[in-house]
Image: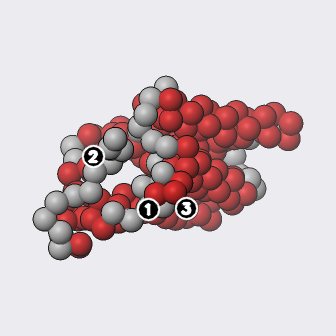
Amino acid sequence: MLHLGDITLTLPVAAALAAWLLACRAWRGALCWGLLYAMAITLVGASKIAFLGWGTGIPALEFKAISGHATGATAVFPIVFFLLVREHGPVLRRAAVAAGLVLGALVAIMLVAGGHHTASEVAAGWATGAAVSLAAIRCTAAWPPGQPTFAIFCAACAFAGATLLIKSAPLGYWMARAALALSGSERLHSWYIHG
């Protein structure tokens, strides 16, 4: 279940969604989706770099950084489910979006249960992802259907390409290097709770 929020899955899904929208000539929707997803991932990365480098956070809430897994899952799955049933009635579309949001919440719950994040970190991630997916759905709701076969082909190519790229990118390493370089510190702050 936790892997549903991993960036090695959510980034390729996000790329596939953008390719699908572009293949359907939904230029505004693709731009909106790309910008919203990029802003969410940048916010997550910046919060992690800030904690690693400077120890920022809110100790009273046990908050260190926004959960990337909760953000990613809640950002991509509601819009995926929405696009899959887009041609059907509004009741099914709303149910699909709700199912995506619930899936994001389940990933968040599993992160807390597994001790990977605190409740405040996953709540921030879920809220960020939900804002992204709901805003993107609003932007993509009126695009024309396009050619499904071509859209599927484009989405599959984008998914495969992004999967290959993300597998070879050690994101955690680069975030740690960025945190050290930007903060001027000699060591990183720990993610783990002591005591």
Q: Is residue 51 above or below residue 160?
A: below
Q: Could you classify mark 1 by the number of other residues whose Cα lies within 10 Å: few (under 14), some (14-19), or many (20 or more)?
A: some
Q: Amino acid at mark 2?
A: Leu
The residue most toward the top is 1
- Can residue 23 be seen here? The reply is no
Q: Residues within 10 Å of mark 2 (few under 14, many from 20)?
A: few
Image position of 141 (left or right of 26): right
Q: CA distance from mark 1 to mark 2?
A: 31 Å
Height in image: 163 above or below 137?
above
Q: Which mark is residue 36?
A: 3
On the image, the x and y values in percent for residue 180 come to 19, 65
Q: Is residue 43 above or below residue 8?
A: below
The three-letter amino acid code for the residue at tag 3 is Leu
Q: Residues within 10 Å of mark 3 (few under 14, many from 20)?
A: many
Q: Quick one: SS at disc 3?
A: helix
Q: Earlier in the sequence, mark 2 or mark 3?
A: 3
- Lower sequence index among marks 1 and 2: 1
- Please give the label number shown on residue 165: 2
Q: Are marks 2 and 3 in contact (CB under 8 Å)?
A: no
Q: Nearer the viewer, residue 159 or 192?
A: 192
Q: Position of residue 64 (x, y in %)?
A: 42, 55
Mark 1 to mark 3 CA distance (whole Å): 24 Å
Q: Position of residue 39 (x, y in %)?
A: 49, 64
Query: Looking at the image, is mark 1 or mark 3 nearer the viewer?
Result: 1
**Which residue has dot 1 on it?**
57
Marks 1/2 in contact by CB < 8 Å: the verdict is no
Left/right placement of residue 63 relative to residue 190 reads right
Q: Nearer the viewer, mark 1 or mark 2?
A: 1
